[in-house]
Amino acid sequence: MKVIILIFFISMIYSHKVLAKVELSVEPYLGYSQMSLTFSGNEETQLAAVLGGKGGLQLGNLFLGIDFHFGGPYLLEENDNDYTNHMWGLGGAYSGKKIRAFLGYYFTNILEDVERNIKYSGVAYKASIGVTFASVLSVNIEYVIQNYKEYAGNNLYSSQLNDFSATMAFFSISAPLVIK
């Protein structure tokens, strides 16, 4: 997955349309997500609100920049614990007249179990596709794969972390703004 994202970024940088016009781009988004956690073979799913934003350079039809994502609280059925999730990363997008596509790599991905005071950290990958309406709003469907490698807190054994993963699918509405 990292190789695909790297190839995507390099092709964006060397595109002949990239050099045409450079503008600042900001895109706040609000959505609703379904997070599925698999922990020691048990899968739990819950819905929660998502808030985030992208910011960076708009290079013709291409975007390169950062993405911040905050979701939660997710109340999971098995243990009634609240979880929050936040991610910081880099991404690239193609924006046509109506269709938009985004790929991102999140070097900071933290899932926090609020009640037990445990923070899981790792990386995440995100892909999304959106449709732009009236050039001011975009409706997006996004999918995130999350991997956790470390934890900090109590009541957790390192062997349990090997069986811990998460995926997230969400619907969002964003307002892509280009500052000229």
Image: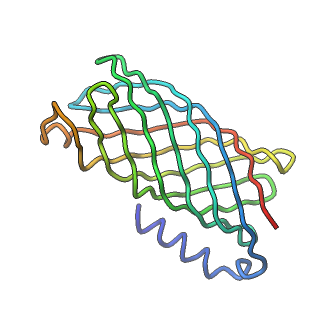
Nearer to me, 37 or 1: 37
Horizontal side of 16 relative to 111 (left or right) equals: right
Q: Quadrant of the C terminus?
A: bottom right
**Residue drawn 54% across and 50% down?**
68
Q: Give the image location of residue 5, x and y in percent.
A: 48, 65
Vertical comparison of 21 with 80: above or below: below
Horizontal side of 20 relative to 113 (left or right) equals: right
**Residue drawn 67% across and 62% down?**
94
Vertical comparison of 57 with 165: above or below: below
Nearer to me, 164 or 108: 108
Q: Quadrant of the N terminus?
A: bottom left
**Residue drawn 78% across and 80% down?**
20
Horizontal side of 40 relative to 76 (left or right) equals: left
Q: Give the image location of residue 58, x and y in percent.
A: 71, 67
Q: Give the image location of residue 111, x and y in percent.
A: 36, 39
**Residue drawn 42% across and 46% down?**
145
Q: Give the image location of residue 98, x and y in percent.
A: 79, 52
